[in-house]
Amino acid sequence: MGYIHCCGGLHKTKSYKVIPQGDFVLCELDYLKKCPVCGHTVVQLTRVDKNDNISVVRKSNSKAVSFFDKMKKFILYEKIPQTYKKCGKFYLNYNEYGVKKRCYSNLSTLKIGLCESKSLNNNNIQSF
C-alpha cells in the first residue's frame, strides 16, 4: 500500500507494480480514487533508473483517469500489504513478592524477582 501527499496529508492508495520501460529499473503506480479532503482523483507514477535517479509523473482529475487507463496494460500486479496477526494469546508470567502474575502489555513497569522481607531494615546498617 502506497501513500500520496494531497491536501496537506498522506492518503493511502492502491499500489501497482508496472513493467519498467527504457532505462528504468523500477516502476510503481499509486492510484488515489478520491481524496477525502478535496475529492480529486490522483495518479502518481514513480520510476527509478540505473543511476538511482527518481522521476515522478503526477496527474489529477480527468487526466489521472485517462493516464490510469493507458497504464492498465503495463500493470504486472497489485501490491497488497501483508496483514500480521496480533499475538494476543502470549502472556509473560513473572513472580512479584511470591505471587505469580501475568504481564499483558507494559513490560517497562515490571518488577521481576522482588522478594518481600520484613526482617530487612535498611535504617539500622552497621558498619564494621
Image: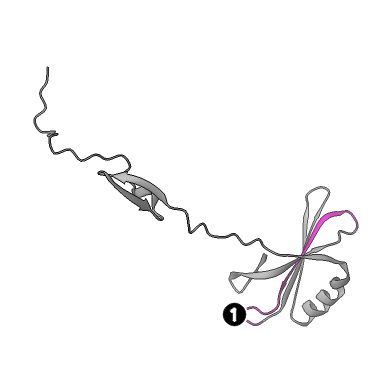
Instruction: Give the quadrant of residue 121.
Output: top left
At 34% from the left and 47% from the top, the residue drawn is 110
Question: What residue is pinned by disc 1?
Answer: 37
State the image coordinates of residue 3 (x, y, percent, origin top left): 65, 66
Q: Quadrant of the C terminus?
A: top left
- Tell whether position 23 is magenta: yes
- Placement of 86 over or under 114, stated as above or below: below
Amino acid type, label 1:
Val
State the image coordinates of residue 42 (x, y, percent, origin top left): 72, 75
Decide if residue 93 is on the left or right side of residue 36. left
Decide if residue 121 is on the left or right side of residue 16. left
At 35% from the left and 45% from the top, the residue drawn is 94
Q: In this view of the protein, which residue sits in the foreground, 63 or 75?
A: 75
Chain part drawn in magenta? 22-39
Check the image and tell me how it is coloured: one colour
Instruction: Give the quadrant of residue 70.
Output: bottom right
- Of helix, strand and loop, which one carries label 1? loop
- Placement of 28 over or under 64, stated as above or below: above
